[in-house]
Image: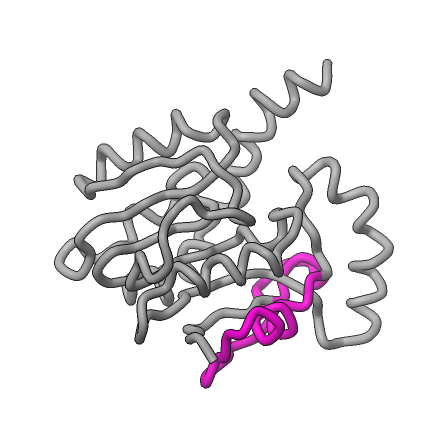
Amino acid sequence: MCWRCYQDKIFPWALDLACGLPMIGRMRQQVVPLAQGRVLEVGLGTGLNMPHYNPARVTRITGLDPALELQPRARRRIEASGLDVELLALSAERIARPDASFDTVVVTYSLCTIPDPLAALREMRRVLAPGGSLLFCEHGRAPDAGVARWQDRLQSLWGPLAGGCHLNRDIPTLLQAAGLHCPQLHTGYLPGPKPWTFHYWGQAYAA
């Protein structure tokens, strides 16, 4: 099988399956319904967050994702949701919107794959309106030294197979470096192999 076939055909299916697991859906349900007003979703992917938005709270969603091969699945979920969504095939390191354009930024299971997550978070902070919030749910570096060592060992094999996903990114450190603070940061393991399942989620604000 050629690498391009894997990226275009197999990977979108595998990503949709893995990110659509029930336990992942329950994590999305904890953060996405809090979105309100003008929403930017970074890493919209195959549109798995669409069923979790509250239409009564959201006026419009701008979905950002450079992976064009994921858009057909995303468009089907957008249509089923009835939400007003604009898709932009752009990377998050440079968000083509003016300062303070959004009331909420949503990023779920995307900081692991963005090539420069710190630049992306700084852009998310820039486009947030005063008083706006960043809603996030991400897997990342585990606090247990043994698990973290396995994350580091597995990364060189895992990354190329999983679309550039990083198992070992330190989400709280990235948020702080981008000028965001999270008064209530939630953490914990989900069921499954520990190198893949340590999670961070919460609501962050401009510092």
User: Which region of the structure is painted magenta?
Assistant: 169-198
Q: How far from the left and from the top, in percent, is residue 65?
A: 47, 39
Q: How far from the left and from the top, in percent, is residue 187?
A: 56, 75
Q: Is residue 148 above or below residue 54?
A: below
Colour approach in the figure: one colour
Image quadrant where residue 177 sits? bottom right
Image quadrant where residue 151 sits? bottom right
Residue 7 lies in the magenta stretch: no
Work out which residue is located at the far bottom of the displayed protein and give it.
183
Q: Quadrant of the N terminus?
A: top right
Q: How far from the left and from the top, in percent, is residue 148?
A: 79, 67
Q: Is residue 117 above or below residue 48?
A: below
Residue 196 lies in the magenta stretch: yes
Q: How far from the left and from the top, in percent, is residue 164?
A: 68, 42
What residue do we see at 44% from left, 52% from top? Answer: 22
Image quadrant where residue 130 sits? bottom left
Relative placement, left or right, of 4 versus 57 is right
Q: Is residue 96 above or below residue 190?
A: above
Relative placement, left or right, of 118 versus 21 is right
What residue do we see at 72% from left, 20% from top? Answer: 3
Task: Judge by depth and name the residue closer to the eye, 100 or 19.
Answer: 100
What residue do we see at 82% from left, 75% from top? Answer: 145
Relative placement, left or right, of 153 versus 163 is right
Q: Is residue 127 above or below residue 85?
A: below
What residue do we see at 61% from left, 56% from top? Answer: 117
